[in-house]
Amino acid sequence: MPATAISPTRAEDYPEWYQQVVRAADLAEASPVRGCMVIKPQGYALWERMQAILDRMFKETGHVNAYFPLFIPLSYLEQEAKHVEGFAKECAVVTHHRLELGPDGKLIPTGKLEEPLVVRPTSETIIGAMYAKWIQSWRDLPVLINQWANVVRWEMRPRVFLRTTEFLWQEGHTAHATRAEAEEETRKMLEVYATFAERDLAIPVIKGPKPAGERFPGAVDTLSIEAMMQDGKALQAGTSHFLGQNFAKAQNIKFASASGAEEFCWTTSWGVSTRLIGALIMTHSDDDGLVVPPRIAPHHAVILPISRTDEERAAVLDACRGLEASLVAASFAGEAIRVKTDARDIRGGDKVWQYVKQGVPVRIEIGPRDLAAGVASVCRRDRGPKEREAIPLAELPARLPAILAEMQQGMFERAVAFREARSVRLGSADELTRYFAGDDAGFAWVHVADDPAVAAVLDPLKVTVRCIPMDGPDEPGKCVVTGREVGRRSVLARAY
RNA sequence: CGGGGCGUGGCGCAGCCUGGCUAGCGCGCUUGACUGGGGGUCAAGAGGUCGCAGGUUCAAAUCCUGUCGCCCCGACCA
């Protein structure tokens, strides 16, 4: 066996390491359908955790869930010019509605549709069409709706969780009476995403608007949260768009204001996807596999009975069940401790390594020796696989939440430290070129104007402006390309 | 769509150039024994239309033609 559970290591071959982590943790696998993945129970459990937490946060901020159709009439997509431009090239199109058995036993599509249907790449247009019907008066506003759905974008280069043809996400769509209110909504939801990423996923993010070229098709402004992966590349982890009145005008979403005037709504949309699972993997996992922060972990801990004889087994299992019951009664982050006892009849070593590779935060082993001493051997996923601490059984319900809290905090701090260590401030186009020619490039904080000339310089480096960070103080400076004065630095990086 | 590569048990591969016994190997799986605080050892066993279609031949995983699919590198992207 190699020294690490995952081969190759991050340093040896980062993209391959990522794939192997997904495989070793049994999160997902390729399907017979090109570019589409099967999310397996272990992977789906992570998504369910994300859904549960986010859904609560959406409701707490006044949103409600609804569901809109998978199919969108082709003509709907044509309504907003930039939107068309942005999505036309990557749509799956339904043109028929029936199959007929051919003479050779093959099925032939027949029943051509008068108007083709597009499988939603995003739902702005179909939802907008409904909003146009629903909204008549200022009293109908705001409309604050979210939907959990799947979408299809015919991407050329799929990559599990990061970019697949079909993916799961949530998309919030809101309509407001005023510009200020819609802008406030856009910022508020970005804040929800940032809080979720940092507090629950332990992924530090940078919040800020995108330059014009990186905006969502049809948006006036796109805000994003950007995270750094362990190879120094950026991952857009969530976006919140201020759509202005672009879609309202294209789709006739109007209301009568308090003064009786007819006005167009101001709309927003915001979303995060199963890509967050990819972000989670690439932020925390190590050369032994997946590492999951406790708050998002489907199981906080797993109890592993160790025994040889049948008598030992009975006693040990009994102790495990007892411990499980007392742990479930304890809580972490406002939720009951999620723990299971794994009594499967497979080799102990196999079992341990399975959980290491799955990233379960805490492993609790109980064998005859522990039982005699009234303790359990506790191993943390954020420490070495051999490191263990004997903790008295009676103290565990109180100690475990503290350990989980420490792990959660530690993972976040570690990720922040990593990002800071691979962030630089650069003052010239020359420095920039040299920096991104290096092997350990990360985030470069640079003064750049929102200008095509900047993109021309960054393009050959395969670098993009990730966002213009909106938090914290920063001094103005001259754009390193155009020389134009800008208010603050942008974050530049290679991105997924 | 342009450039490169690959299709052989569940997974990873060898064999192909130079056609020839019953198509191999590693991992995994099943069963048993020995083990037992760490993915152990040994033994037995299950599992294959060699991507598909045609052709050449006494004989094709191997040679020829066609075809389908996948992967990697580019353009696109949550």
Image (cartoon, coloured by chain):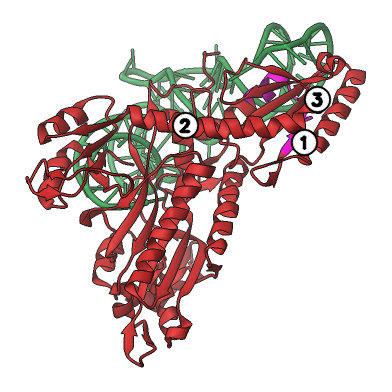
Q: Earlier in the sequence, mark 1 or mark 2?
A: 1
Q: Which chain is green?
A: B
Q: Which mark is residue A327?
A: 1
Q: Earlier in the sequence, mark 2 or mark 3?
A: 3
| Label 3 secondary element | helix
Q: Which chain is red?
A: A
Where, quadrant-wise, is the N terminus of chain A in this rendering?
top right
Q: Amino acid at mark 3?
A: Leu
Q: Amino acid at mark 2?
A: Glu
Question: x%, y% of residue A476?
Answer: 17, 45
Where, quadrant-wise, is the C terminus of chain A in this rendering?
top left
Q: Nearer the viewer, residue A36 or A409?
A: A409
The residue under label 2 is A413
Above or below — where is A77 with respect to A186?
Answer: below
Q: Is residue A351 magenta?
A: yes
Q: Amino acid at mark 1?
A: Leu
The residue under label 3 is A393
Position of residue A371 in the picture relative to residue A89 (left or right):
right
